[in-house]
Image (spheres, coloured by chain):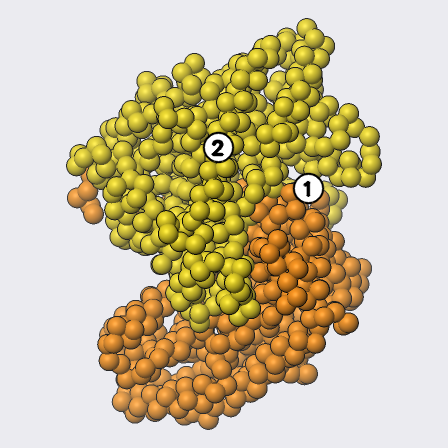
Chain colours: A orange, B yellow
Amino acid sequence: MADNLSSVITVDTVNPAFKRIDYPIRGPLSLRCSEIVEELSQGIKKPFDKVIQHVGDPQGLQGQKPITFVRQVFSLLMCPEILMSDPRFPQDVKNRVKEILSHKTGNTMSSYTSSQGLLVIRKHIAEYMFKRDGYPSDPSNIFMTNGGSVAIQIVMSALRTGMDGDKREGFMCPIPQYSLYAAKILEQNSYMIPYYLDEDNDWQLNIDGLKKALDDARPYCIPRALVLINPGNPTGQVFSYKAIQEAIKFCHENRLVLFADEVYQENIYTDEFPFYSCKKVLHDMGHEYKDLQLISLHCSAKGYIGECCCRGAYFELHGFDKETKGLFLNKLTMSACPNIYLKVAMSLMCKPPQPGEESYDLFIKERDTILESLRQKAVMTTNILNSLPGIKCNKVTGAMYAFPRIILPPKAINEAKRLGVEPDYFYVSNILENTGIFVVHGSGFGQKEGTSHFRITIIPPLEETTLMFDRFNKFHQEFISKYS
Amino acid sequence: MADNLSSVITVDTVNPAFKRIDYPIRGPLSLRCSEIVEELSQGIKKPFDKVIQHVGDPQGLQGQKPITFVRQVFSLLMCPEILMSDPRFPQDVKNRVKEILSHKTGNTMSSYTSSQGLLVIRKHIAEYMFKRDGYPSDPSNIFMTNGGSVAIQIVMSALRTGMDGDKREGFMCPIPQYSLYAAKILEQNSYMIPYYLDEDNDWQLNIDGLKKALDDARPYCIPRALVLINPGNPTGQVFSYKAIQEAIKFCHENRLVLFADEVYQENIYTDEFPFYSCKKVLHDMGHEYKDLQLISLHCSAKGYIGECCCRGAYFELHGFDKETKGLFLNKLTMSACPNIYLKVAMSLMCKPPQPGEESYDLFIKERDTILESLRQKAVMTTNILNSLPGIKCNKVTGAMYAFPRIILPPKAINEAKRLGVEPDYFYVSNILENTGIFVVHGSGFGQKEGTSHFRITIIPPLEETTLMFDRFNKFHQEFISKYS
């Protein structure tokens, strides 16, 4: 459009930050996947009849059933006039709706709330963390946001120095990592300090690696925060208690904020690696560490709830003074307030039905069915992947993902180079076109130079998993022999 | 907390942008108002027994009833298993739920959608604009966001130059204005080019004023866009067709993007000033102007729907090339996708029940009752205000607000100066403490140097309006005589 003299905003003049954003999970391969779905629906012939998308969308893509209690509260909240007397809705559903409405201005779900989120629901969240950790939580430290992605963006924006060049802020981020961190760093022109998770040790922390990464980065930035994703995305590991202790000590020694992305904390699959929140470990470590600044993130899109599209999330500030917390609120006022549904989702996640309540038994049954199924699929996914030639996969102990390493033949690597793409991008785009299975290339999350990986979810229904791996296995063998 | 050596992030080190934000609508007076509500509920004695908040929250604060069709679709969408066969839900409600779910992955409201919003709902929006303007609209130009406030922030961010100093971007904003624009300009360190609406001419545009404002600002910035708020917030005027034509010509001549904030387009109260969208006028003006870049904003919080807390909004890009639109999408991918409820709210607003459908008659009755009541209150509010000594108020022809001018006695102005606040802030905080009526000070929206105003809504229930103005009148007379 260079010939269009009247355009003010073009790719040449738009905010350059918009051009720096690179978010592979919703990138070109994801768009191609949507095209293929469309092509199939138009009757275009493919070597497969169905697309299987490996993104963390448990109800949409993998057939996970919603929690009945959650949906009933949502539904009743919208039409209390019609449904409050409906005997099909249990009494505890009605009580929750009454409780929430009684705290909303005008007794209606339509009204605006505090920009930080409805106080009664922040109290539910605080009680949840108290039960989890054994340490009290203050609702004034809790900020609800429109999805975990918005929370990440607000927090990373808050930690900017406001200066450019060598004085810009540095964020220590795991490699591999959930790629929104890298995207946000690119957008706001911060400095990324990559630290490598230890693939040979089930993707655990390598504390010496952390130290070296920080030392190497010091000349180029003001290090501000360490991002810890636990359980890991895309790596599917749960950090040990000791690893979290070490991370806390490291942040304390080096005056870093600890940003704990704990959105998968309900997705835990082994007794060997239970979930410990950074906040609990920090408190366990006693007085010396009590002033460490910790920001913890949680959301309602994952776990057993899996309500992705109501965008429920919160972050909790620990160790921030009142005035600084006021500035976070200042920022949030600009978006007026979080939507009502995300607030309700957080209430339901943090305060599910209790023993003795009408919905309790069904809730426990639904929750345990989902978590048990995920546990089985975590084992199955790892086992099958490790049985394939040239693929090696760490045990999935948490979250919803496996991140297997693939040894690609040199011919395949050369072909990728010729096409100007990363080898694992070449590999996964071949998977997509040939099998309809959409997995994300490892280079989209970061990985050690010269290695190749992909991220696959453990969440497709059990009955589809075998079939899917048959298709995948066939493809993989053909791909390897084609390029050997 | 200067003595707290281990804090990394304090008011001194937090992103300075967070400190620049100043958003008076949710500022200290709003917090004080919440405190008073709390104090009343604790039984603390006040010269009033109820707070009346004048913010644009029609259902929460002013008792506006929800549209039944809207709530029924929401409710059914959550629990189709239970409610799809329920005879209390009309057939057109069921059909809409089926339509929406059939376009969602996994046939569930839980699943993620395109970051731009569900295509079928963008089609509903496009049809709505086509019916309104008589010109076609393309769903690929429509971007749904989590509330109008987020849309404003994304658009204003997109228009940055990415440079500081004299090369930073300038935004022409009306004075008075909805203060989020000023807040965003402060946050992102853009340059504000204020243009004054003509109070002596019912807050219409003054095109000579626009020209002068732009000329004065040229040395200090790269002017990027003209923000036009129509109907006006806080000024309650609807722009004439001619005013919009002039604004378009002005943007075309000066190579500015026109950013049309049209969130109050359904709130129109006189035949003399109907609503014309900037997009319609632009198309009416023919070929010469067709390439003008226009961004139009609409939302579901106002109008007759008034669903504030589902945060439904969209912006439409006109005259942007495909690649540049892709960069807007790039930015939106970072928040994954808009929540499902806001998308549904936009569908219901843009495609309400049609003649012959089961919900149609009730919908029309509810809609017309709300709009007729607003029309009456618009007249009443202006009349009462103009009957008070020292208050002069332009006719409210649209939106939900009046912005009367008050002549404050010099003693009151001196007292405000002594307290270090703006005179109108002093005046409205006295209103709040003495009457429980929360209106926003004019200086929060901008006004001509030396004048004082306040923003009052026209939306409290008719039966409360008389009583409220009695209280207000009594206060006003006492205030004036106290300081005369």
| Residue A399, placed above or below residue A159 | below
Q: Are marks 2 and 1 on the same chain?
A: no
User: In the rendered structure, the residue with mark 2 lies on which chain?
Assistant: B
Q: Secondary structure at mark 2?
A: helix
Question: Within 10 angstroms of label 2, few (less than 14), some, or many (20 or more) residues?
Answer: few
Give the distance between the C-alpha atoms of the residues marked 2 and 1, in whole angstroms: 45 Å
| Residue A426, placed above or below residue B285 | below
Residue under the image location 52 percent in, 76 percent down: A64
Residue named by callout 2: B372
The percent coordinates of residue A281 (x first, y second) are 73, 67
Pick the quarter of the image with the C terminus of chain A: bottom left
Would residue B65 be found to the left or right of residue B270 on screen? right
The answer to whether the residue labelled 2 contacts the one labelled 1, judged by CB atoms less than 8 Å apart, is: no
Amino acid type, residue under disc 1 in the picture? Glu
| Residue A92, placed above or below residue B427 | below
Would residue A107 be found to the left or right of residue A423 on screen? right
